[in-house]
Image (cartoon, rainbow, N blue to C red):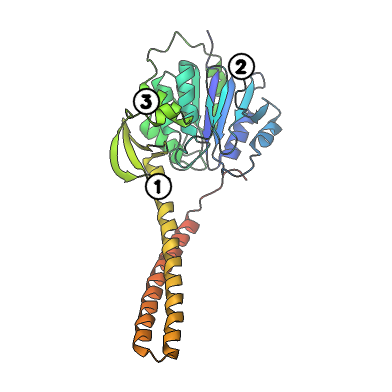
Amino acid sequence: MPGHDIIVIGASAGGVEALSHLVKNLPSDLNAAIFIVLHVPSHSTSVLPKILNRAKGLPVSHAIHGEAIFPKRIYVAPPDYHLLIKSGHMHLSRGPRENSHRPAIDPLFRSAARYYGQRVVAVILTGALDDGTAGLMAVKQQGGVAVVQHPDDAMYSGMSRSAIDNVEVDYILPLSDIPNELVNLVNTKVEGEAENPVSSQIEFESEIAELNMEAVENPSRPGKPSSYSCPDCGGTLWEITENSLLRFRCHTGHAFSGESLIARQSDALEDALWIALRALEEKASLAHRMAKRLQNRSSSLSAHRLEQNAQDAEHSAALIRDLLLKRDDESIAEPHINQEQ
């Protein structure tokens, strides 16, 4: 019988340091395949394999679409691709973003749960917000093991706290203890087969991550229509409730946890404010120009009306500018860190 030989790891803010420590302290003969998702900008160049290979332990490389899975290897999701694992091989997908990320943690965890069940160990490390919680829930549902970095030990505790609050986690450990626990789990044989068949929801969401059109167009999607619209495409969001976890997914597949949706709505609001500011400033500029032309033609009444319109637009623009500056001050007080420097 195999041990827990499929390890999936998710990290976000502060993740490079955490992953470097973890990989450095894993034995080079660990009989497991390890898959890592670190939130990185879609258009960046990932150097995470190069950084992790400095540990001179298990070899680390970016995952390749269709590549066979081998033990004693670490595979990293490349930028702008979800990393999914299937029976014996890896699959890279540019499917819809989840929690505003691609790669995202939930699709990796969900695919591991679907195809490997009890053999999976899922690890949540440092990170803000709550990506990974839904995927961790899927791993537990299929009999896998959930390991979470202790929130007090994490550089950013959001992902850890969300996982602990919503999932029956098996191990809550400081980062320094996680490598030894992974070794123990890999050397622990999995007893029997998973009792729970793969749920239709796990299958559906796994297919969505691959942009499978049968799943995208399937009217029997889990959840119920909500009153919210998708901030990425404008479509209706469907509300999915799993125990205490509230999630949303639109028709085209964009997925959000509650916290991630609020964060994305905030970004959309800022975009709208900048658009409104530009429109008001252009309106004021044009009104001033037209008023000046009318004054030269001795049309003082019309010129006065246009000047009043310009002043009103400038006043509204000033209010929006003050609001944007206030948001900037709040961002400086709580900086949002790019994880892979």
- Rounded to the nearest angstrom, the CA distance separating label 2 from label 3 is 31 Å
**Residue 149 in sight:** no
The kind of residue on which mark 3 rests is Gln
Circle 3 is placed at which residue position? 201
As rendered, which of 90 and 171 lies closer to the eye?
90
Give whichever of 52, 93 is nearer the camera: 93
Name the amino acid type tagged 2.
Asn
Q: How far apart are marks 1 and 2 (CA)?
A: 42 Å
Residue 31 located left or right of residue 227: right
Pick the front one: 318 or 96:
96
Q: Name the residue under label 1.
A: 231
Residue at 44% from the left image edge and 61% from the top image edge: 275
Q: Residue at x 56, y 31 (%)?
A: 36
Q: Is residue 338 above or below residue 271?
A: above
What residue is disc 2 on?
31
- SS for dot 1: loop
Q: Which residue is drawn at 34% across and 82% down?
A: 305
Choose between 304 and 330: the one closer to the eye.
Answer: 304
Between the C-alphas of marks 1 and 3, the distance is 23 Å
- Name the N-terminal-most of marks 1 and 2: 2
| Residue mark closest to the camera, 1 vs 2 | 1
Q: In this view, does 5 lie to the left or right of 56?
A: left
Q: Name above or below for residue 305 compared with residue 130.
A: below
Against 324, residue 150 (above or below) is above
